[in-house]
Image: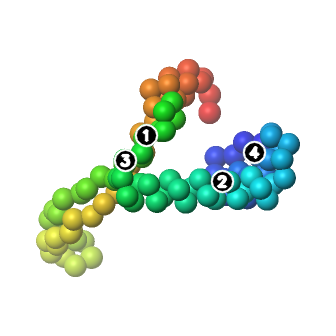
Amino acid sequence: KLRKNMNVKELSETVAEELNMPEYKVRKVIIQTFRTLRTYILKAQVIRIRNFMTFYIDVKQPREYFSMKEGKMVVKPRHFALKVLPSKLLKKEISAKKTY
């Protein structure tokens, strides 16, 4: 059963069913995988998973903008954003799909 938004429990149940494994073991692996990805993104700032995605941290420079709330120009400080880019193969598979 595919859903657009899944939590770890639902993801682990789906994978466990497909692999015919206990759900609690699959959940441990998924949680550890996410922890490892997070750790490496914070350390290396770029992770490429071949034929899947690239994760990287994008540095946003400080900028001025008009705040409607305060009614004046405000400086937004430098901040970081996580960017996710699908691989060419994944893009091709998505574009070949006719309906969503």
Q: Are marks 2 and 4 in contact (CB under 8 Å)?
A: yes
Q: Is residue 65 above or below residue 17?
A: below
Q: Are marks 4 and 1 in contact (CB under 8 Å)?
A: no
Q: Secondary structure at mark 2?
A: helix
Q: Tell me the distance, in whole angstroms, between the alpha carbons under discs 2 and 3.
A: 20 Å
Q: Position of residue 71 (x, y in %)?
A: 19, 76
Q: Are marks 3 and 1 in contact (CB under 8 Å)?
A: yes
The residue type indicated by label 3 comes to Val
The residue type indicated by label 2 comes to Ile
Please report the residue visible at 85 percent of the width from the left and 42 percent of the height from the top: 20
Q: Position of residue 72 (x, y in %)?
A: 15, 75
Q: Which residue is most to the bottom? A: 70
Whichever of callouts 4 and 1 sits on the residue coming sooner in the sequence is 4
Please report the residue visible at 64 percent of the width from the left and 59 percent of the height from the top: 31
Q: Position of residue 83 (x, y in %)?
A: 38, 49
Q: Which quadrant is the N terminus positioned in?
A: top right
Residue 30 tag number: 2
Q: Is residue 75 above or below residue 84?
A: below
Question: Is residue 5 found left or right of 43 in the rendered image?
Answer: right
Residue that mark 4 sits on: 15
The residue type indicated by label 1 comes to Arg
Residue 46 tag number: 3
Residue that mark 1 sits on: 48
Residue 33 tag number: none
Please report the residue visible at 68 percent of the width from the left and 54 percent of the height from the top: 29
The crowding category of the residue bearing disc 4, from other C-alpha atoms within 10 Å (few below 14, some 14 to 19, many at least 20), is some
Q: Secondary structure at mark 1?
A: strand
The label nearer to you, 4 versus 1, is 1
The residue type indicated by label 4 comes to Val
Whichever of callouts 2 and 3 sits on the residue coming sooner in the sequence is 2
Q: Secondary structure at mark 4?
A: helix
Residue 15 shows up from this direction: yes
